[in-house]
Amino acid sequence: MNASLYELLALAMRYWFAALLALIVFLLTQSFVREWRIEKAVQRRIADTAATLGLRVLSSEDRRVQRGLLLPLDGDSLLGSGGGCDLRLRTRALRRRHLVLRVEKDRVYLYPEGGALVTADGQRVRRGDTLLPGQNMQAGGLVFRLERLQGEEAEAWLDD
């Protein structure tokens, strides 16, 4: 065989390799997109059937905390004004580490930190007391209501 035939064969193999690589990338991209769409559909179904819980600010002594602000709850969350808090509100109405909220099914267990004053429907909260959807809670100078998030609010939280 002469050199031109080898060059032609090498050129064909390069194009074959490039085409094969492009096909693999295309199929992987399709697979990832399909999986992403399935995951989003499952999340929407979960949001429709099982409500996510959230705390809505009803009133505040501090004007920097917006009334109507929604704080979605997920698992264990630390509420306070400090830097390491999951639910951080920059206000002097809360301690740096004010309250741990533990979400389990359709209720929230409350664990005040360091003797912080927390009340639920007018009663002082002790460690492990529960808060149910529709009940109000006061922590520091803030009043919250526990709500079920459904529809668009729950989807917006799940999409984040």
Image (cartoon, rainbow, N blue to C red):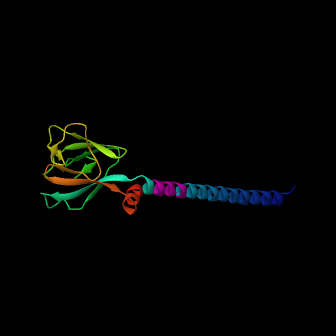
Q: In front: 128, or 68?
A: 128
Residue 151 in magenta stretch? no
In the rendered image, which quarter is residue 147 located in? bottom left
Vertically, is 142 above or below 75?
Answer: below
Q: Nearer the viewer, residue 156 or 124?
A: 124
Quadrant assignment for the N terminus: bottom right
- Residue at the extreme right of the image, as rendered: 1
* Viewer-closest of 19 and 120: 120
- Between residues 98 and 128, which one lies in front from this camera angle? 128
Left of 149 or right of it: where is 124?
A: left
Instruction: Answer with left or right where residue 41 lies relative to residue 25.
Output: left
Residues rendered magenta in the picture? 37-46
- Residue at the spot 37% in from the left edge and 56% down from the top edge: 157
Residue 131 in the image: state x and y as whole percent: 26, 46
Magenta segment, principal secondary structure?
helix
Q: Residue at x 37, y 44 (%)?
A: 105
Number of marks in the rendered image? 0
Quadrant assignment for the C terminus: bottom left
Residue 95 horizontal/vertical position (percent): 15, 45
Counting from the top left corner in percent of width and height, residue 15 is at 72, 60
Q: Is residue 45 magenta?
A: yes
Residue 62 visible in image: yes
What is the x, y in percent for residue 93? 13, 51
